Image (cartoon, rainbow, N blue to C red):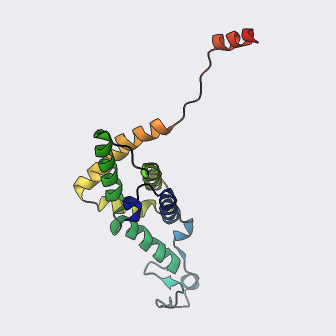
């Protein structure tokens, strides 16, 4: 909420951006790994432990409590915080303000980077499958708005933000040499 309320607080926006990046770019420890107890076939899997130790799932893989917490953070970011909806609403509100002759909000650069993080992690990343599922759970109209935003608005914003290198024509280089 503070990210959107204080649209000119760059320090706050950067910290929120770092938090989102930490959640979305979590190391690949989120992958489940085979349980040593099941490889032995002599020992039964341990029951879930409330002391923060590893648990064994029905599929015979060990679930790290940090992985469960991380998956919960990703879900919280998309469901409770409504990250996608908030990005879309803020973008539309900014477009409306700019259309009326107002200035671009101060958090739009950070919002662009956060949206790009979501897109990049939706395409490839440690939580790709989970993000894909969470996007599919969005209401149909919101999902359509998101897809349109990514394909058109975000792409155009990224294109505008890309710095083009200066192009020299061979004739202009030779004319520069004659000056010296």
Q: Is residue 10 above or below residue 66?
A: above
In this orientation, does residue 63 appear?
no
Quadrant assignment, res 79: bottom left
Q: Residue at x 27, y 50 (%)?
A: 144
- Residue 179 relative to residue 67: left or right: right
Residue 137: x, y in percent? 29, 62
- Residue 173 relative to residue 53: left or right: right
**Which image quarter is the N terminus in?**
bottom left
Q: Relative to the observer, which residue lies in front, 5 or 112?
A: 5
Residue 172: x, y in percent? 64, 13
**Which image quarter is the C terminus in?**
top right
Residue 121: x, y in percent? 47, 56
Q: Relative to the observer, which residue lies in front, 74 or 102?
A: 102
Q: Relative to the observer, which residue lies in front, 71 or 2?
A: 2
Q: Is residue 178 above or below residue 33?
A: above
In this orientation, does residue 41 appear?
yes
Residue 50: x, y in percent? 48, 91
């Amino acid at each position: 909420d503070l990210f959107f309320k204080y649209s000119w607080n760059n320090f706050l926006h950067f910290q929120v951006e770092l938090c989102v990046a930490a959640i979305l770019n979590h190391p690949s420890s989120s992958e489940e790994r085979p349980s040593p107890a099941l490889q032995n076939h002599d020992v039964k899997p341990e029951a879930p432990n409330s002391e923060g130790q590893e648990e064994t799932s029905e599929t015979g893989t060990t679930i790290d409590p940090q992985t469960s917490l991380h998956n919960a953070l990703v879900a919280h970011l998309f469901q409770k915080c409504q990250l996608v909806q908030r990005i879309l609403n803020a973008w539309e509100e900014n477009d409306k303000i700019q259309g009326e002759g107002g200035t671009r909000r101060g958090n739009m650069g950070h919002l662009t980077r956060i949206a790009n993080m979501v897109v990049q992690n939706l395409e490839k990343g440690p939580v790709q499958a989970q993000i894909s599922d969470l996007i599919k759970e969005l209401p149909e109209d919101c999902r359509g708005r998101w897809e349109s935003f990514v394909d058109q608005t975000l792409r155009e914003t990224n294109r505008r933000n890309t710095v083009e290198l200066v192009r020299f024509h061979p004739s202009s280089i030779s004319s520069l040499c004659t000056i010296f």
